Image (cartoon, rainbow, N blue to C red):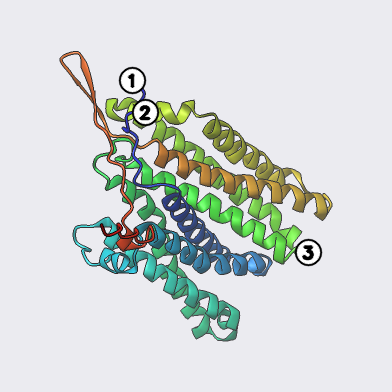
């Protein structure tokens, strides 16, 4: 029996949620790396500024994707009302706090507060620490949100927040790298590329370890094994994520970090751009694959298989997903 044919695979969360998870990871990851680089000296100043510019806009666009999936602003407001029992509500306030702190950090950075006085530098340090705390919460929340879906065994794993946090740091770093090359491409930027390359290599390795641990733990669980097999059998996932999204960026990052000394800036920028774009593609493929592989468990009783069917969401005109249906003609 094909689980895709009988509706066992979930259909509630689609590409809009995947885009939200991706952009949330990019924004929080870029901010975290930028805040860390802000303490590493003047040569990382351009990368820091680019990362700060990415954090708030990425979360804002991701939130719009989430709002579009909800279908109504009223539902978004209600999402933050039950903090004690709902991860959606907790995430609402975590993301709101992160967006505010990331915007404040950007303003302080642009004003040069960290250069003016010791008090200004201390203020930037406090905002950085609080911002990184909320950014880590945002990264982990994207995984905790999936884990809160009790009916999908493939998502109900403590490794999911770790995987999404590692992927968020990697994709955020790749976005920051691309922004640095696009808006601050210069010989000075080439001096920062070895540090950025080493950072990218470390983050990709962490993501490789996380995805291997996640798929291994899912395969050991009978209810989640089918979803893990579905992910690994997908050519788009193996090629788009493992090979192009992780393998190639890792090789490029290692070359930038350890083997590109003395190279001309132009080829460095070209290969760094290729690695960054492929790394971003891999992060999006990962989230789509995890969502699309989520399936209700198969029950095995008395030698028979019983497959539960996911109920397809019916768009409702009153929440804005579809235009109101025309009234039937009077007869």
Badge 2 element: loop
- In the picture as drawn, the residue positioned furthest to the front comes out as 331
Q: Can you identify the residue that label 1 sits on?
A: 1
Kindly tell me whether residue 120 is visible in this rendering: yes
Image location of residue 317, percent across then percent down: 33, 59
Q: Toward which corner of the image does residue 196 lie, by quadrant?
A: bottom right
Image location of residue 253, percent across then percent down: 66, 45
Q: Are marks 2 and 1 in contact (CB under 8 Å)?
A: yes
Residue located 24% across and 42% down the image: 150
Residue 5, disc: 2
Q: Is residue 115 above or below residue 199?
A: below
Quadrant of image for the C terminus: bottom left
Left or right: residue 221 versus residue 115 is left
Classify 10 Å Cα crowding around label 2: few (below 14), some (14-19), many (20 and above).
few
Q: CA distance from mark 2 to mark 1?
A: 8 Å
Residue located 40% across and 46% down the image: 162
Q: CA distance from mark 2 to mark 3?
A: 54 Å
Q: Are marks 3 and 1 in contact (CB under 8 Å)?
A: no
Nearest the camera: 60 or 4?
4
Image location of residue 179, percent across then percent down: 65, 61
Q: Can you identify the residue that label 3 sits on?
A: 186
Classify 10 Å Cα crowding around label 1: few (below 14), some (14-19), many (20 and above).
few
Nearest the camera: 47 or 300?
300
Q: Is residue 258 above or below residue 237?
A: below
Image location of residue 240, percent across then percent down: 58, 37
Quadrant of image for the N terminus: top left
């Amino acid at each position: 029996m094909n689980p895709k044919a009988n509706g066992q695979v979930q259909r509630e969360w689609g590409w809009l949620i995947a885009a939200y998870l991706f952009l949330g990871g990019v924004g929080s990851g870029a901010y975290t790396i930028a805040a860390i680089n802000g303490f590493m000296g003047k040569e990382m100043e351009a990368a820091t500024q680019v990362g700060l510019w990415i954090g708030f806009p990425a979360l804002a666009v991701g939130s719009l994707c989430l709002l579009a999936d909800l279908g109504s602003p009223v539902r978004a407001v209600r999402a933050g009302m039950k903090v004690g029992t709902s991860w959606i509500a907790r995430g609402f306030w975590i993301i709101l706090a992160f967006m505010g702190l990331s915007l404040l950090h950007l303003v302080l950075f642009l004003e040069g507060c960290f250069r003016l006085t010791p008090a200004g530098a201390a203020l930037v340090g406090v905002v950085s620490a609080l911002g990184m705390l909320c950014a880590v919460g945002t990264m982990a929340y994207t995984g905790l949100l999936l884990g809160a879906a009790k009916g999908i065994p493939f998502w109900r794993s403590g490794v999911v927040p770790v995987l999404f946090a590692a992927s968020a740091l990697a994709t955020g770093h790749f976005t920051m790298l691309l922004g640095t090359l696009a808006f601050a491409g210069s010989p000075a930027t080439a001096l920062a590329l070895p540090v950025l390359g080493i950072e990218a290599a470390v983050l990709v390795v962490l993501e490789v370890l996380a995805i291997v641990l996640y798929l291994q733990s899912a395969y050991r669980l009978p209810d989640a094994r089918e979803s893990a097999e579905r992910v690994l059998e997908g050519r788009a996932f193996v090629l788009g994520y493992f090979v192009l999204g992780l393998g190639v960026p890792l090789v490029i990052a290692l070359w930038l970090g350890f083997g590109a000394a003395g190279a001309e800036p132009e080829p460095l920028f070209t290969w760094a751009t290729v690695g960054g774009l492929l790394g971003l593609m891999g992060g999006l493929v990962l989230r789509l694959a995890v969502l699309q592989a989520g399936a209700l468990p198969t029950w095995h009783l008395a030698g028979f298989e019983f497959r539960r069917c996911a109920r397809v969401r019916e768009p409702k005109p009153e929440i804005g997903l579809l235009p109101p249906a025309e009234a039937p003609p009077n007869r």
